[in-house]
Image: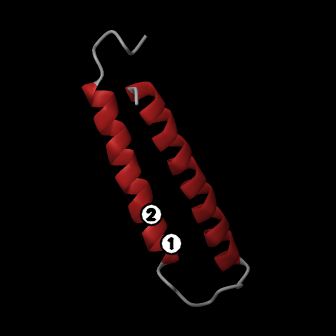
């Protein structure tokens, strides 16, 4: 898989997880779930992992690929 395709795939997954996290946190605002089941922290951890992978891909790109 090319770096660009891998970057796009990871970015799409991260965006989907961020959307899920926002929905989960919005439910807390309305008092739907008043207990912490660890979902928010799991989503945040996975988002951080994906961000690190994306950053690593960007770092490995050649200097001319930024254009």
Q: Residues within 10 Å of mark 2 (few under 14, many from 20)?
A: some
Q: Which mark is residue 29?
A: none
9 left or right of 27 in image: left
Please provide percent x and percent y for residue 32: 71, 84
Which of the 4 image quarters holds residue 31? Answer: bottom right
Find numbered disc 1 in the image and state the secondary structure of the residue it sits on. helix
Cα–Cα span, label 2 and label 1: 6 Å
Image point (40%, 26%), residue name: 2
**Would you name the residue on which mark 2 appears?**
44
The front one of 18 and 29 is 18
51 left or right of 31 in image: left
Image point (65%, 86%), residue name: 33
Which of the 4 image quarters holds residue 66? Answer: top left
Image mark count: 2
**Colour style of the rendered protein structure:** secondary structure
Find numbered disc 2 in the image and state the secondary structure of the residue it sits on. helix
Q: Are marks 2 and 1 in contact (CB under 8 Å)?
A: yes
Name the outermost residue toward the bottom. Answer: 35
Please provide percent x and percent y for residue 64: 33, 9
Please provide percent x and percent y for residue 46: 41, 60
Please tell me whether residue 55 is drawn above or below residue 17 in the rendered image: above
Please provide percent x and percent y for residue 62: 28, 16
Image point (43%, 35%), residue name: 6
Q: Which mark is residue 40?
A: 1
Which of the 4 image quarters holds residue 1? Answer: top left
Q: Residues within 10 Å of mark 1 (few under 14, many from 20)?
A: some
Please tell me whether residue 63 is drawn above or below residue 50 in the rendered image: above
The front one of 26 and 65 is 65
41 left or right of 62 in image: right
Image point (32%, 46%), residue name: 52
> Dividing the image into 4 quarters, which one contains the C terminus?
top left
């Amino acid at each position: 898989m090319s770096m660009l395709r891998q970057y796009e795939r990871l970015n799409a997954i991260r965006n989907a997880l961020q959307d899920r996290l926002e929905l989960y946190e919005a439910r807390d605002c309305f008092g739907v779930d008043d207990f912490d089941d660890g979902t928010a922290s799991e989503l945040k951890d996975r988002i951080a992992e994906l961000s690190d992978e994306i950053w690593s891909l960007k770092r490995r790109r050649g200097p001319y690929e930024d254009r």
